Image (cartoon, grey):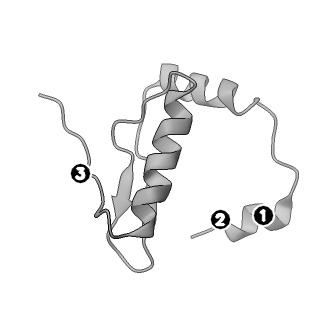
């Protein structure tokens, strides 16, 4: 049995972000089955768990090098 996170409401801007991320990952042949929206406040995007093969593919798609903009990294902290 396969479980997946339900898609967020189409009325929520987070839905657009989830769909954009899903499409961008698909462009690299990557699927995160648990990608979805957390319904807390503020809304968060759930990236979920993945196997090592998917994690490696994700790292390769991101270029494998660390992001140098520390200010941008702080803005993503929850």
In this view, 26 is above or below 44:
above
Say the numbered circle drawn on residue 72: 1
Residue at x 17% of width, y 30% of height: 2
Placement of the C terminus among the 4 image quadrants:
bottom right
- At 30% from the left and 60% from the top, the residue drawn is 8
Residue at x 49% of width, y 25% of height = 54
Q: Is residue 36 above or below residue 75?
A: above
Question: Counting residues from the N terminus, which is met first, the one under dot 2 or under dot 3?
Answer: 3
Query: In the displayed structure, does residue 67 sit left or right of residue 32?
Result: right
Q: CA distance from mark 1 to mark 2?
A: 7 Å
Q: Position of residue 58 (x, y in %)?
A: 59, 30
The local crowd at label 3, few if under 14, some if 14 to 19, many if 20 or more residues have their Cα within 10 Å, is few
- Look at the numbered disc 1 and give the secondary structure of its residue: helix
On-image quarter of the N terminus: top left
Q: Mark 2 against mark 3, which lies toward the viewer? A: 3
First in residue order: circle 3 vs circle 1 = 3
Mark 2 element type: loop
User: Where residue 22 appears, x then y in whole percent?
Assistant: 46, 40
> For this rendering, which residue is in front, 49 or 14?
14
Tell me the number on the disc at residue 6: 3
Q: Residue furthest left?
A: 1
For the residues labelled 1 and 2, say whether their Cβ atoms are less than 8 Å apart: yes
Residue at mark 3 to residue at mark 1: CA–CA distance: 29 Å
Q: Residue at label 2?
A: 76
Q: Nearer the viewer, mark 3 or mark 1?
A: 3
Q: Residue furthest right?
A: 68
Picture disc at residue 28: none
List the single residue furthest toward the front: 11
Q: Are marks 2 and 3 in contact (CB under 8 Å)?
A: no
Question: Whole-Å distance between the Cαs marked 2 and 3?
Answer: 23 Å
């Amino acid at each position: 049995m396969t479980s997946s996170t339900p898609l967020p409401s189409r009325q929520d801007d987070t839905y657009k972000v989830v769909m954009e991320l899903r499409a961008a990952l698909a462009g690299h042949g990557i699927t995160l089955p648990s990608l979805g929206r957390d319904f807390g406040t503020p809304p968060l995007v759930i990236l979920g768990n993945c196997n090592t093969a998917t994690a490696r593919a994700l790292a390769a798609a991101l270029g494998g090098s660390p992001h140098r903009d520390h200010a941008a990294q702080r803005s993503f902290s929850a």
